[in-house]
Amino acid sequence: MLDINFIEAKWQREWNNAKLFESEINQKKPFMITAAIPYPNGPQHIGHFRTYGTADAVARYKRMRGFNVLYPIGFHLTGIPLLAQANKVKDKDQSILNDFRSFGIPDQEIEKMSDPLYMGTYFANEVKSGMKISGFSMDWRRVFTTIDPKFSKFIEWQFGILKEKNCLVQGNHPVGWCKKENNAVGMHDTKSDIEPEIEQESGIIFDIVGEQYGLICATYRPETIYGVTNVFVKPEVTYYICKINDSQNIIVSQQTYEKLIFQLKLEKISEIKGQELLNKKCINPLSKVEIPILPGSFVKEDIGTGCVMSVPAHAPFDYVALKKLYNSGYLKEEIKPITVLKINGVQTEIPSLYYLTKVSGDINSSDEKIEEATKLEYKEEAHNGVMIFPGYENMPELETREKIKESLSSNKKYFPIYILANKTKVLCRCGTEIVVKVIDNQWFINYGDQNWKNSAIEALSEIDVIPSKSKNALLSAINWINLRAVARAQGLGTKFPLDKNYIIESLSDSTIYMAYYTINYLIEKVSEEKLTPEFFDFVFRGIGDIEQVSNNTKIDYEIIKKSRESFTYWYVETSRHSGLDLIFNHLTMYIFNHVLIFDKKYWPKHIVVNGLVMMNGEKMSKSLGNVLLAKDAVKDYGSDILRLVEIGNTDLFNDSDFNVETAKSIKDKLDFFFDCCVKLNEIPSNKLENIDYWLYSKLNNKKIILTNAMEKLELRDIVTNIIFNTSIELKRYFSRGGNNSIVLKDYLSDISLMLQPVAPHISEELWHVMGNTTFTSTEKWPDINKELIDVKLEEKEQGLDSLIEDIKQAYELTKKKIPNISSCNIIVADQWKRNALNSLIETKKIDATINALGEDVNKEQAAKYLSQLFKKVNELRRCEVDEQEEYELLSSSRDYISRMVGVQIQVQKEKESNSQRASRANPMKPSIEMI
RNA sequence: GCAGGGGUGGCAGAGCUUGGCCAAAUGCGACGGGCUUAGGACCCGUUCCUUUAGCGGGUGCGAGAGUUCAAAUCUCUCCCCCUGCACCA
């Protein structure tokens, strides 16, 4: 039995002593692998085995393939969540305190976590120790965090380049906002962690006839402007007349005014009751038609602007409201809906009525029904609708929307209005309702720049993306990404160089940090103020003269030289491991920033996307209540087994339980391998027999499969092949009478070597038990010996297995009828049948085949046989084993078959048998006769 | 809505790129049997339906249609699910 904890600790000690993973420049080809750095806002849970275990497997495999491998790690402390969490601790938020206690964190530590930096550092250390006991082959000398002052210098340098290349632009940007705290509010700052969903609406101004002010209506569908028949206001509501953008006057409801002042420049002039607007008329800003202002009881005074433009032909609510007004007698004359768009194939005068009827509603329906009709209509019209209004004929609705916005804008009758689309009100932690604020002069990184995009696409075309289907996603991400806001008001991180009141947003400060690993331990003794852009320019871009850089920065010449050497050595062959969820942000930004900053030689080469599993420890803890901490799991199961489980089982985190059964079954298999290794010296070494060659053949096939899987990172295949199939093969070898230490030792040695990437500790242990004194970590990946692959031999063994299956079934079924069966004849098919089979496959013609068989064959018999075969002529497979070979195989395996099926076995040849069933024999599918 | 990825046996999950040993790997589960005082572990078998001993036959990989001698695999249409959509790591 393997004592997992003992051997893991032992080998970790050995690796440390030998400094196996401290990577320095040498003659070998470099390979640098980086995995997304953890965000330490909690203890490390077993999910990390997927990300870092996978990267570790690659690192270990590449070492065995002769590469000089660098696998560094850092910690990402930048951002808001730590701050938000620290605030919760400060506020004594019970749920977070309970969470932390359940992780076994002492109370006095939790208290100190009201300081976000303390919390981050604490958990970073936790995660680090979790990684260490997991035995990941990282170079621990290179650890840093994204809030290290020196790293900040590096980021400032990066942003200097972004600025210099005109990649930073300013503009307006809507954000969730707490007016009490005067702060931008993201998901982490709201009650119950609700993400504020900001949507854009169109505000359209309708001037009022004879007045100095207009109404501003909010709508999702400005393209229906030509279908507007009237405007609704709510009579009992107070409206404010205000000046917008120091030019025209508009009115909005009092309640929406309070929100809109955060988006539009509004200056209140006076108040007016909705009632007072009712007798007035206003002007459609595009068609210039005069339309009435009508009372709308359904108008919500706190949404949009409190004024609604009415399009009865395309909005069921408007249609119903107008009908009701007419029925009540308020309107003397019915207002006729104006239809402006149609859907091909749908015949209707008034679409809103059509949809109302479609959901089996009428004008007396409940709001829910009308809402349903509205949604359906909006959806179908947006999808399939084309305009019928003169001037816009056949233009799709969405295209028209943009056109109309433009026309309105040019008349200054259009203003974007942002609303929160959340179903319920979003509250700040302090209890205040969140509003949308448009921030002026927000800084963006302009990923929309076409030249920049082109370079990124060029780079992507050279990147080996695993799995390859993710390459598509990356390409569309590159095309899609546009402006990205880069400055944040709060959180930990590097100050934004162009406005020191802000902090660089945390995904933007981690796009090129991998390059920093190549130098950070070299500049350990350099004080941060010396780390000027000149230094980084030289090290990472080769700009300038080293003497001069040294003189100007006062940094030691040797340090600069080494840094440059280190970067240029390591950063050529880089592999990036990241999660599927990061394709649309981090990985895309990673490519963009690399192509902007570095020479082509140092662009990304290899991206590995860990698919299928969403890593979200937080969710795991809260919804499932079953966080399995890495350190506990390692103690219970061992790092190697966790690696194998994680790699072999994708959907671990979708299940509520850690799959103990799988872990156990893997442990059993490993124990079995271990026992085989231990017993190796009790096994004699003999002359090689068929079954030994069979094992060699299997072994070399396995090497092909595993090498291939390692190259393509099909890790699941690795686990099934090296754990489960190996155990099946070994068991079959023994039960088939295999007992030869020569082949076993070769087999087990290669298995233990090939275990190294995915189960490094056990790999070392097996290797060691077999008498080796080196590390598998530094051994070579086994070579494939194709000559030992014997297809025919494997075919024979497989034939034997299926024969045994057949006999067993036949035996079981026959036993019921004839209880005293004692033995079984197996009858080997004649050679002519093999010839006929193979010939039929080639010619696909029965007559030609028969003629080719020669004179000694009974043609009638052959025709019967072939006509049967011919039914499936396209599915037949050649049989390479001839009659004599099959006969010898079965004869020599009599004991084995006997043992497996429990009856005596006799082997006969078809032509020598007088059994009635003899003619049923097929090549490699002998006839069976129970006696 | 836009974008990306999916829908396979009791479950998880391969396979579909390069159509054919695919009734579909592997693991788990379930059932039966062996071993045990018993349980666990381990071993053997069964696990779509049918079958006149194995052979064989039928149905079958979201739904439907098509291409083909042949489709889980290729094409088209439809339905459904997951993820992301920006200041949030």
Image (spheres, helix red, strand yellow):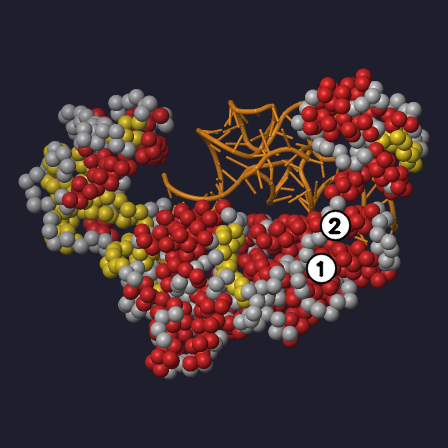
Identity of the residue drawn at 86% across and 61% down:
A682
Closer to the chain start, of discs 2 and 1, is: 1
Same subunit, labels 2 and 1: the answer reads yes
Q: What residue type is labelled 2?
A: Leu
Identity of the residue drawn at 58% across and 59% down:
A58
Q: Which of A313 and A399 is in front in this view?
A: A399
Left/right of residue A197 with respect to residue A302 in the rendered view: right
Residue A163 point in image, percent of width and height:
29, 64
Q: Is residue A891 visible?
A: yes
Q: Which of A905 and A384 is in front in this view?
A: A905
Helix, strand, or loop for circle 1?
helix
Q: Which residue in the protein does label 1 denote? A: A752
Where on the picture, by quarter, is residue A406? top left
> From this viewpoint, which residue is outermost toward the top?
A860
Residue A631 point in image, percent of width and height:
61, 65
Q: Mark 2 lies on which chain?
A: A
Q: Which residue in the protein does label 2 denote? A: A788
Identity of the residue drawn at 44% across and 47% down:
A473
Residue A457 point in image, percent of width and height:
39, 51
Left/right of residue A140 with respect to residue A893 in the rendered view: left
Query: From what the image shows, is residue A674 above or below residue A25?
Result: above
Q: Which of A177 and A593 is in front in this view?
A: A593
Q: How crowded is mark 1: few (under 14 residues within 10 Å), some or many (20 or more)?
A: many
Identity of the residue drawn at 71% across and 32% down:
A877
